[in-house]
Image (spheres, coloured by chain):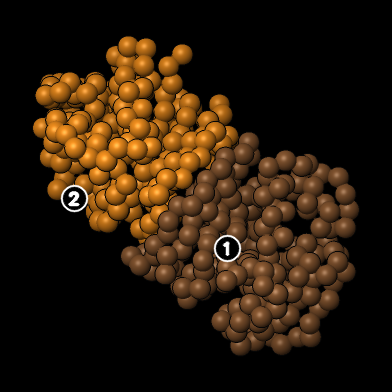
Chain colours: A brown, B orange
Amino acid sequence: MPSVFIDVGMSLDGFIAGPNGRPGNPVGDGGTRIHEWVFPLAVLAERAGGSGGERGPDDDLVRAVFDRTGAYVMGRRTFDEGEVGWPEHAPFRAPVFVVTRHARESWVRPGGTVFHFVTEGFEEALRCAREAAGGKDVRVQGGASVIQQALRAGVVDELTVHLAPVLLGKGVLLLANLPAETFRLTPVEAHASARVTHLTWRVER
Amino acid sequence: MPSVFIDVGMSLDGFIAGPNGRPGNPVGDGGTRIHEWVFPLAVLAERAGGSGGERGPDDDLVRAVFDRTGAYVMGRRTFDEGEVGWPEHAPFRAPVFVVTRHARESWVRPGGTVFHFVTEGFEEALRCAREAAGGKDVRVQGGASVIQQALRAGVVDELTVHLAPVLLGKGVLLLANLPAETFRLTPVEAHASARVTHLTWRVER
């Protein structure tokens, strides 16, 4: 059965974004330092409709994550930041279900990304994403609120964290608002590249 | 040249101990969950003067850490918790320099551990440890205060974190009180065992 997975960049001190994130200041103050390892990769240039960039194990890994993903679930704030920040060819190239209170017509982008706006909550967005994924996996993209909802709902199969060797000191914590005692993960994979450490756990139900 | 290294267990949400740690409640409320992967290992049983326990990659790894260490630097609170908590054969089997305000005669334990009490601060304790290490490496054992002093002082060559797949929610953070912008690590190694993920970074000076 296709998986529901989280795949997210995090600072060593647990933040997935700096403080004061908003449209025009995506991932918050200093938050881009978490993703420095991603920006030079060829797959990002290609997904933006261009070419060039670095190849290698990190690039292969990000490529594989895009390839396995048939649909996305995204929080409204992440969408708002990305709406003005992504290139015209948004990188997803698949249906993206945005959890929001505000109904809006689907927004079709060049390159195959279509944003759908779901006003009935996270679980309904996940249902739509599973249906739209065409047998591929569903990625709970973020931000923290949607990721934490997914973990609390017990619908996540796999958690991947790209642990960046930086400290932010403040910002948005990935692993907050979770039931500590009942949260069970099993380590599955760990790989250190020159810039980042890739970690995957299976989430036990 | 021998290294100065940190080797510490941490929860997924960044804690190396739970709250309310004190003699009789070592590593604080729930903090032993961080170290669950260590307790069954053969090397711990042996170091306590006994036998039995599990062998395998985790055991080999802990054994190698003990073997490379010629001397330890330890905080006073960690010592206070351990003084009443360690078995009579304390596991270190090497000189341990405790940073404290209270002068005290050296305390010799069966099995080769000798605690020395240094009242002139962390850097002096480190100097003593380097001298006593006989060409082996010096481990900054902890707790958080001594580890953070060592990182701020720029004397650490290598940071190893054993990332336990548990959440504590509160307690003592490893990576607090550090100069975020100037703290530079390079990933060196990552290995997932069935119970824990071992991560090592080189600390850039």
Q: Residue at x 67, y 72 (%)?
A: A135
B54 and A139: which is toward the camera:
B54
- What residue is pinned by disc 2? B25
- What residue is pinned by disc 1? A6
CA separation in Å, label 1 and label 2: 35 Å
* SS at circle 2: loop
Rendered image quadrant of residue B165: bottom left
| Subunit bearing disc 2 | B
Q: Is residue B191 above or below residue B150?
A: below
Q: Is residue A146 above or below residue B131?
A: below
Kind of residue at disc 2: Asn
Q: Is residue A186 visible?
A: yes
Residue B71, position as x, y percentages in the image: 30, 21
User: Residue A80: which numbered mark, if any?
Assistant: none
Q: Residue at x 12, y 25 (%)?
A: B109
Q: Residues within 10 Å of mark 1 (few under 14, many from 20)?
A: many
